[in-house]
């Protein structure tokens, strides 16, 4: 961030804190939270599908 000339803009909620570089703004904590939630939901869906398939072929 420093090498790009950016600054942190801290907010009351940590996930809403921003990094500003020029005219652009990023929300790194919010982005990370969304990414982990989407990965977890993908994993949950995948495991649920696997469980249903196993149940279907269970003797």
Image (cartoon, grey):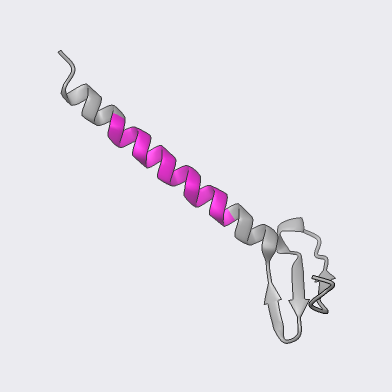
Residue at the far front: name it: 3
The residue at 29%/32% (across/down) is 50
Q: Quadrant of the N terminus?
A: bottom right
Outermost residue toward the top in this view: 59
What residue span does the magenta drawing correspond to? 34-50
Q: Residue at x 36, y 34 (%)?
A: 47
Principal SS element in the magenta part? helix
Where's residue 12, x and y in %?
Answer: 81, 61
Q: Residue at 82% of width from left, 74% of height from top?
A: 3
Q: Nearer the viewer, residue 27 or 21?
A: 21
- Residue 28: give x, y in percent of width and height: 68, 63
- Give the image quarter of residue 4: bottom right
Asked if the stretch drawn in magenta spans residue 42, the answer is: yes
User: Where's the C terminus, which quadrant?
Assistant: top left
The number of numbered badges drawn on the structure is 0
User: Horizontal placement of 48 versus 9: left or right?
Assistant: left
User: Residue 44: horizontal and vertical position, in percent?
Assistant: 41, 38
Q: What residue do we see at 49% from left, 43% from top?
A: 40
Q: Measured along the vertical axis of the image, is residue 26 above or below residue 30?
A: below
Q: Is residue 4 above or below residue 54?
A: below
Would residue 39 appear left or right of 51 to someone viewing this image? right
| Quarter occupied by residue 15 | bottom right
> In x, y percent, where is residue 9?
82, 71
């Amino acid at each position: 961030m420093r090498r790009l000339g950016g600054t942190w803009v801290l907010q009351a909620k940590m996930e809403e804190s921003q990094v500003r570089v020029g005219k652009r703004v990023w929300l790194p904590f919010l982005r990370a939270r969304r990414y982990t939630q989407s990965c977890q939901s993908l994993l949950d869906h995948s495991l649920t599908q696997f469980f249903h398939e196993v149940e279907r072929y269970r003797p």
